[in-house]
Amino acid sequence: MARKYGLNSYTVQESNNAKIGQAGFKELTSAGNTGDGNFVAFYVTGAAAADVATVAATCHTGDDMTATPFLQGTLVYGAFKKITMSSPTDADVHVLCYYG
C-alpha cells in the first residue's frame, strides 16, 4: 500500500472513515434514544449477520426518518438531531451514534 500524507491524499470514503468518531459517540444498548444533540452518523452492531435494530431519527435539515430496520454492519450518515432505537433483535444489538 502506498504511503499517504494527510487527509487530502485520501479518497472521499477513506477520509470520511478517518474522521468519523473523532468527536465521540453515544451507544444505545436497548430501546431508547440519544436525546437532542448533533449526530453525523450511526452504526448498527451485532453478533450475528441477521441481527437487526429498528432506528428512527429526527433531523436538523431534511425529512425525519421513520422507524426503519437496519442489519448489523449498516452505517448511515445524516444531520441527525435525535436517534431512537426500538425493537433490537437481541442484547447483542447496539447502535453507535457519532457526534459531529
Image: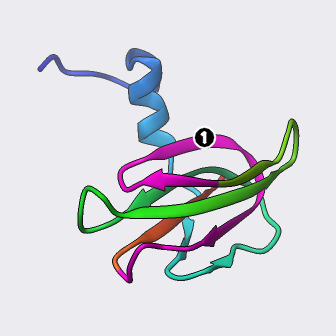
Compared with residue 26, is residue 71 higher up or lower down, i.e. above or below? above
**With respect to residue 46, does 17 lie above or below?**
above
Q: Looking at the figure, which quarter contains the N terminus?
A: top left
Q: Dot 1: what SS?
A: strand
Give the residue displayed 60% in from the left and 40% down from the top: 77
- The residues colored magenta run 68-91
* Image side of residue 22 versus residue 79, left or right: left
Q: Residue 60 in the image: x percent, y percent?
A: 87, 47
Q: Write down the residue under mark 1.
A: 77
Compared with 10, 18 (above or below) is below
Whether residue 86 appears in magenta in the rendering, the answer is: yes
Residue under the point 78% across and 74% down: 35
Q: Is residue 98 magenta?
A: no
In the foreground, 81 or 6: 81
- Closer to the camera, 30 or 89? 89
- Image position, residue 73 (x, y; %): 36, 50
Whether residue 21 appears in this view of the structure is no
